[in-house]
Image (spheres, rainbow, N blue to C red):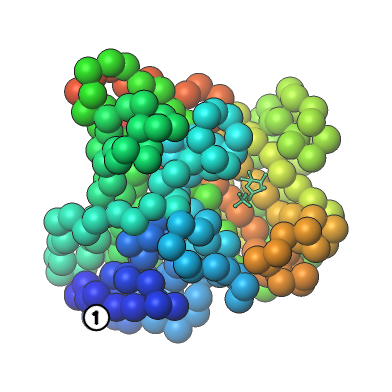
Amino acid sequence: MTIETVSFKNSPALRLTLPDGAEAIVLLHGAHVVSWKPDGKTERLYLSDKADFSPGSAIRGGVPVCFPQFSTLGPCAMHGFARTMVWRPGEMETGTDRTTARLELSETPETLSVWPHAFKAVLDVILDAKSLCIRLNVQNTGAAPLTFTSALHTYLRIGNIDDVAITGLEGLTYHDKVTGQENQKETRRELTFAGQTDRIYYKAPKVLTLRDGARLMELHTDNMPDAVIWNPGLERALTIPDLPDDGYQFMVCIEAAAIAQPVRLEAGKSWSGSQILKA
Ligand code: TA6
């Protein structure tokens, strides 16, 4: 098990590896996980060929960390500032069967100008033989309470969107961001895709399953009660400059999120939420 410093698309990154071949890469830019290959060969995350890695950009694909704001629900730019800032490496851990890379972010004059709170965010990327865990910890290091929303905006690589189904959502209430309708009820046992899908499912179960053709992946969450499902479909994809026109066919976002009930932290308190992808 090793963690080495590498350059990924000219961006400083950490590469985690295990003896059985499992590998993950996380950028300092955004603490953005851009690659996960459980067998060392097969990429399980979608990363756009047109993604922009220049400083301050929002990278299309991988796992953007949305913090301290999901979408436009607050004073920050879309999905918050964490995904566009450079995080600093923290303590690393290389055990016998798993490896953890830690990245940290605190307030700067720039963040304070849009979100007036002192904080310490820690993102742990934990790789083991069959799974990848991404855990976000946030501590309120200021003197007053703070609130935030968050999501681990995971872009999963799929064979084709026509062959994909997600189970675990039946019976949940969701907000349909495409139609703007609130309080919709999911009636389907398996969610399949035809055109743009952009939904926030409230109080999702801790395990969702993605079926991609014959392949299954489980997505486990802890303390992130909502689930966002996003695929832009062709029409919306054509309006996204950093996504190839056919990119929507090869990606689906399943995001562990805390949205409906913003997290409130008193001074000195911390919160942790995580998502585990199981190949
Ligand atoms: O999480 C889904 C979503 O909020 C969609 O509405 C969609 O626009 C997407 O995120 C991508 O946002 P971005 O700012 O990365 O283009």
The answer to whether one can see residue 224 in this image is no
Displayed quadrant of residue 122:
top left
Count of marks, rendered view: 1
Percent of width and height locating residue 174: 69, 31
Residue at the image point whose x is 15% and y is 61% from the top: 93
Q: Which quadrant does the N terminus fall into? A: bottom left
Percent of width and height locating residue 147: 41, 23
Percent of width and height locating residue 24: 36, 70
The answer to whether one can see residue 173 in this image is yes
Q: For the residue marked with disc 1, what is the amino acid? A: Pro
Q: Assess mark 1: CB under 8 A from ligand 1? A: no
Does 7 sit above or below residue 101? Answer: below
Decide: few, some or many residues near mark 1? Use Cα within 10 Å; few <14, some 14-19, many ≥20.
Answer: few
Residue at the image point whose x is 74% and y is 55% from the top: 232
Does 267 sit above or below residue 141? Answer: above
Displayed quadrant of residue 52:
bottom right
Viewer-side residue, 214 vs 156: 156
Tag 1 secondary structure = loop
Residue at the image point whose x is 50% and y is 75% from the top: 43
Left or right: 183 in relation to 277: right
Left or right: 174 in relation to 149: right
Does 255 sit above or below residue 140? Answer: below
Percent of width and height locating residue 21: 32, 81
Residue at the image point whose x is 22% and y is 76% from the top: 4
Q: Which residue is mark 1?
A: 19
